[in-house]
Amino acid sequence: MLHADRWGALGGEPLLHRRVIEILQIARASRVADKTEVWTNGLLLPRQPKEFWQSFDILVLSIYPGKHGDDSLYWIRTKCEDEGVELVEKDERYYPNFMTMLEEVPTDRTATIAKFRGCFFRQFSRVANFGYFFTCCCAPHLPMLVQNRPYGSDGIRIEGLEEAGLRGYLERSEPLG
């Protein structure tokens, strides 16, 4: 049986999904993870009803340049505190982890290895999708969208996968494509 420390709604902007509250409620009720998270840029948070705030445990807020002022960040922090939701801030203004991952032109090998070793997503994000397992939320899509490579290029096939193969994939020192 699959169980994780955390299950997260992320990728694109989950608050744009018309059934996000229902999805979060199902994820929480399934007990597939100890905690449920919502990863968002926060722009649509003021529109969310009470049921939204009651359907997850952790809000991961990506703060991009020019998207939030002091007032909106204060509102989000206060709302999370009032609703009993843990807030994790990913401040892309000062620590641009996500934005540096989306480079169309590859960096040199040394820079790529350094980026891979320090990548937040590699350490904390896992995706199972269409028969493949990936170490981060970007890996299923970037090879196709940016590098014209087939789906699964930066993943490992789940069918027939044994523990040693999974460990090798997770613990490798070589960067993704």
Image (spheres, helix red, strand yellow):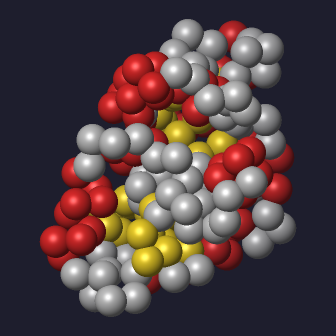
Residue 116 location, x and y as percent? 41, 34
- Residue located at (70% from left, 28% from top): 105
Residue 48 location, x and y as percent? 76, 51
Task: Using residue 56 as the reference point, say whether residue 46 is left or right of it.
Answer: right
Please, which residue is most extreme toward the left here? Answer: 164
Task: Using residue 131 as the reference point, say whether residue 4 is left or right of it.
Answer: left
Between 100 and 86, the one lying in front of the other is 100
- Residue located at (79% from left, 35% from top): 43
Q: In this rendering, does residue 48 appear at all?
A: no
Task: Using residue 157 as the reference point, say whether residue 25 is left or right of it.
Answer: right
- Residue located at (30% from left, 75% from top): 3
In the rendered view, would you say 42 is above or below 38? above
Between 149 and 159, the one lying in front of the other is 149
- Based on the displayed image, in which of its 4 quarters is residue 52 positioned? bottom right
The total number of labels drawn is: 0
Between 121 and 3, the one lying in front of the other is 121
- Based on the displayed image, in which of its 4 quarters is residue 144 positioned? bottom right
- Based on the displayed image, in which of its 4 quarters is residue 18 positioned? bottom right
In the rendered view, would you say 173 is above or below 128? above
- Residue located at (52% from left, 16% from top): 95
Q: In this rendering, does residue 20 appear at all?
A: yes
Q: Could you tell me which quadrant the N terminus lies in? A: bottom left
Residue 31 location, x and y as percent? 37, 78
Between 98 and 155, the one lying in front of the other is 155
